[in-house]
Image (spheres, rainbow, N blue to C red):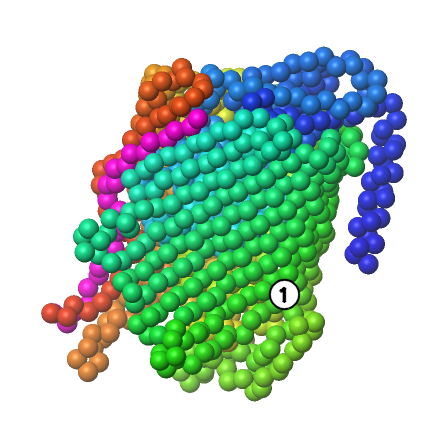
Amino acid sequence: MNIRIFWLILIFTFSINSIWSQNKFTLNGVISDSESSETLIGVNILIPELKTGATTNEYGFYSITLPEGTYRVVISYLGYSEVSETITLSENITKNFTLTESVESLNEVIITENVEKINIRKPQMSLNAMSAGTIKEIPVVFGEADVIKAITLLPGVTTAGEGASGFNVRGGAADQNLILLDEATIYNSSHLFGFFSVFNPDAIKDLKLYKGGIPARYGGRVSSVLDIYQKEGNKNKFHMNGGIGLISSRLLAEGPINKGKGSFLLGGRATYAHLFLPLFDLDNKAYFYDLNTKISYRLNDNNNIYLSGYFGRDVLSFSDSFENTYGNTVLNFRWNHLFSDKIFSNLSLIYSDYYYGLDLNFIGFNWDSGIRNFNVKYDFKHYLNNNITLQYGLNSIYHKFNPGEIKPSSEESGINPDKLIDKYAFENALYLDVEQKLSEKIQLSYGLRYSTFLRLGQDELNMYANNEPVVFNQELQIYEKAEPIGIEKYKRSKVLKSFGNFEPRLAIAYQLQNNSSIKASYNRLSQYLHLLSNTSSPTPLDIWTPSGMYTDPQILDQVALGYFRNFKNDVFSLELETFYKTVKNRIDYIDGADLIANDAIEQVILNGEARAYGMEILFRKNTGRLKGWIAYTLSKSEQRTPGRTENEPGINNGAWYKTAYDKTHDISITASYDFTQKWRFNANFILQTGQPVTYPNAQYEYNGISIPNYGLRNEFRLPSYNRLDLSATYIPKPEKSSGWQAEWVFGIYNVYNRYNAASITFSENRDTGVNEATRLSIFGIVPSVTYNFKF
């Protein structure tokens, strides 16, 4: 029935298209860089006579339908010289444009890719975009440009602290973020437990972070979408660029395949600080390496194919007794096809894999776990007319979850092999997005996504009395694991539990004046996967588990309202947003929950709820020698798990408590100053409310041992976090535009050497026998120097 409805929508779409097409003609084509022939995303195509326009999609394609006549077409894109051309429309025309980089704009620091007035009118809100150039200018620890650290300078985005992996958006957990690299899902976005991200800035073409107003084409997570596209590579010339730092280096090569038609890109990064540890009689290792690759080829005017991939690994070892290896592998084949001058399609075949392995030689066994999926996506973008654009498509993902497997490392180890039960699921979705211009002042974006999730059969499944894997002990007033009453075995084709959810999306923009507007949005999203973690930030050992017999999918409802304004011909801009969101079925853990190697995880979790609300302010200076932004977030993030009956207290007595990622105040200031053509200075300052923690509120003695008594969850906070970072970029020969070009980047992370608390733990002092607090800090002041080059 759902497929029939989908095709009826398409038939209706084509019927409407034929009506609107009368006496109108379509201008379409691709916009690319003049030097590399790489397509450009988000380019503005403006028609001043009609006060209308369009933007290129993720593959540089545009289409705009206009009445018959002669028009001036203006092509505008940040960092490129503007192109203006007069075109007479008396028939459908395919017109490709190339843009040339504007030297004067190369060093501009802009958060959004376009600050044209047309974006004031667009209904899309809660969206931030960031260029690779901006990311590279932000001072970070060890001097390595970092995508995740860069987006945490935006309003509404935080992390759990230094050395913590992942990121949190509008009070959501790290596992609630959908992270896409060329449409493939990345399950762990960090290297070395959060010190670096898995994204190589040299390979990034486009980055967008959706915090709200999320279009219907995205689904599967309830907090945000981080959508990253890799560069395609230079179709005309061979180029290389890279950088050499104190502890890591990178190199990227790109060039043509059949000049003008195809290209390749190959980039790699690696750390090497561990190579110097033997000089200090240390046999430990901690390093990562990754590889980005992409091939693109234009078959003809209507067909393009792409093959892209990413492979990354982290290795942590202590002598010969322990080695930890983990990382992502993704592969994506895409086919772009132009059905007509108004219908653009993209078919994607995607493979994603996250692997986690432990070699415990001192015990004598190896441990492997991970998640793997196969994804088929077919997306269409249909330019009905100048006022209506449709996006629709379907998506099917097959998931395989490996919670863990133990294998003896040798015959003499004495360890018996053991395998936790693999889990399987099938996730599907149909969606329709509509962008509609109602008038000169009002634009709408609305859509609907219908998602289904099928939990498939597995080798063994525990059965429980009353279907309750967690029971409440009335005598002790605690939650305990229930004893299974039996075990069932199911074939893989058997559907154990099915879920289906309609996910409506709506956004509206009302233009107050030519340079200001108000916007509002609502979206509902469903998340069928859960990350099992009892830490404030994800760790490689955390396990993904699907919804099923005892765990329901998370359901989010979010509303947002915003005011947007540009000042003084877009020199300054202001974004002010408020939001409120609720999440149903957010999992919580009973006291004493054991998540590691647990083959019955349903015995330690309960379904709760979460909510978050707040205000975000982003003020930017977009042009001039001094550029940058000030971001401020005032927010609150809470969750609770009430008792299932009147006789149960729930978690934390059923009361709302602060989540581990709740930060009341979050201020970041980022600035760039072009001192001369040779010198550029950058700085960022961060001030945040401390992370919520649970401290003991009393202690008692038992057999001469002091035992702490802990109070309510996350009742206290760590001290506030603040840090100042500085960097200076020196370009020896700024006038040089070809051949070997180089720059030096000098940085100081945490200039005033503040030891911010990453955690505070309580333990007994062995000498005095008294419990005491121990403060752990990750970094003090960290200087760095990096040599970047290209040729």
Nearest the camera: 173 or 319? 319
Residue 704: horizontal and vertical position, in percent? Answer: 17, 80
Residue farthest to the left, as pictured:
767
Q: What secondary structure is marked by label 1?
A: strand
Q: Which residues are magenta?
A: 768-791
**Main SS, magenta residues:** strand
Residue 462 percent across, percent down from the top left: 57, 80
Quadrant of residue 144 in the image?
Answer: top left
Please, is residue 270 above or below residue 543 in the view? above
Counting the numbered discs, the total is 1
Residue 660 appears in the figure: no
What residue is at 61 percent from the left and 67 percent from the top?
424
* Residue displayed at 28% across by 51% down: 274
- Relative to residue 771, is residue 775 depicted above or below? above
Q: Amino acid at mark 1?
A: Ala
Residue at 19% in and 82% down: 703
Q: Which residue is mark 1?
A: 425
